[in-house]
Image (spheres, rainbow, N blue to C red):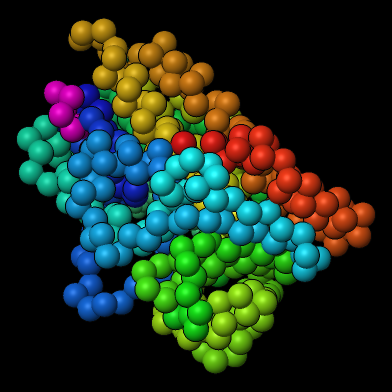
Amino acid sequence: MKFDMVVIGGGLVGASLVAALRSSGLRIALIEPREPSSLPSDESWDSRVYAISPGSVDFLRDLGIWQRMDTSRLTPVYDMSIFGDDNCSHIHFSAYETGVAELAHIIENRQLQAAVWEALQSEKNLDIICPASCVAIIWHTTHAEIQLEDGRTLEAALVVGADGVNSWTRQQAGIGVSRHAYQQIGVVANYNTELPHRNIAYQWFRRNGVLALLPLADHRVSMVWSTSEIHAAQLRELSAEALCLRVAEAASYTLGRLELITPPAGFPLNFVHADSLIKPRFVLVGDAAHGIHPLAGQGVNLGLRDVRKLAEIIRKRGFQSDIGDLMLLRRYECARKEDILALETVTDGLQKLFNNSNPTLARIRNLGLEITNHLPLIKNQLMQHALS
Ligand SMILES: Cc1cc2nc3c(=O)[nH]c(=O)nc-3n(C[C@H](O)[C@H](O)[C@H](O)COP(=O)(O)OP(=O)(O)OC[C@H]3O[C@@H](n4cnc5c(N)ncnc54)[C@H](O)[C@@H]3O)c2cc1C
């Protein structure tokens, strides 16, 4: 089977790239080992949620994906309140002051994933090969050969690695990484709250990690508590009542008492930076290219910005030019380097700054929050990046 492009990994980023190029005339295949999970018929809520930036919303709307979402499960964020670990330093961002309708939308992973996959159905130039696993990629000058576990072989002018932070395709391409484990787990769970969240996303930089409570429809919030492996294990062993009490206390009862509505789950957190985003006939997008700490809620947004740029470069290439050509791919790498490095540096730096018990550092970071809160220009600049 011959294709112009084979995308390996059908997570949000890989599937969005396919959606972005589905009407480009290119012959595309998408390989994904896991069958897409269908949406539950009950009213249950996914505890894996994303803060999707306005820039990503615009992009998903252009692809006809945003329109497929159940609007009753999309929650706009109008304000963001971030607290230091001294119980008084604080920084506040507001959509009104920034001059935008909202700072982000909170959306469940499975709702967004389902909408992206739905948009791919019945496309003529697209082969969705799922469930399927790859066993090898053989690189030739003119094409790459992808061998599947079931014995099938695909040929492609360009292979896209979109297979997440532990990317197999990245290894096959011989691209090295700088990597460190944060030795933290992102503990996620959803709650009903006693007090209304008023569409505010809250975040507390605490001695025992970063706690975020993100608004969901009605009186619900979704928690991401990025904390040490030991503390995460303790949190997950607590009874529902004890966990609610622990989280409500850590959040200074800002939202009153809590009631657990989805059991806690944990995700290990790693920093991964790929040494290169490209090689001949190969390109990396999403977490396969950059795994960042979730404290800024920007991983998917960064991956969708990869997709926007790659799709734009492929669409604008000269008529009939080779899409696996290294010169073309270099334009993508050059265009994406700065944004990726900036976000990697900020998230990694903040994680290190706040995951440190040195009292001098504690004073500096809390003072930094407080001072920044009174500098509208800097606040605005910080926000502009998060909105893109
Ligand atoms: C606790 C937590 C909270 C987060 N919150 C936010 C947030 O609020 N906002 C935000 O923007 N980001 C957030 N992120 C980051 C976000 O989850 C990731 O950036 C995003 O999921 C990356 O998408 P992806 O498609 O690149 O990779 P993945 O979601 O990892 O998808 C990779 C896909 O590749 C497939 N795959 C794996 N191996 C192979 C293989 N060998 N062959 C073929 N396919 C393969 C997998 O089945 C999967 O479908 C958070 C992350 C964590 C851990």
The stretch in magenta equals 22-28
Q: Is residue 194 above or below residue 113?
A: below
| Front residue (pair 353, 275) | 353
Q: Quadrant of residue 362?
A: bottom right
Q: Is residue 149 above or below residue 153?
A: below
Is residue 141 toward the left or the right of residue 296 in the image? left
The image shows residue 305, relative to residue 41, as above or below, that is above
Q: Is residue 337 above or below residue 287?
A: above
Q: How many marks?
A: 0
Q: Is residue 290 left or right of residue 147?
A: right
The kind of secondary structure the magenta stretch mainly shows is loop
Residue 249 picture location, percent across and down:
66, 81
- Between 229 and 101, which is closer to the camera in this rendering? 101
Question: Residue 226 location in percent, x, y?
Answer: 62, 64
Residue 341 position in % (x across, y down): 61, 32
Residue sitting at 34 percent across and 48 percent down?
Answer: 12
Residue 142 as seen in the image, left or right of residue 188? left
Is residue 79 in view from this perspective?
yes
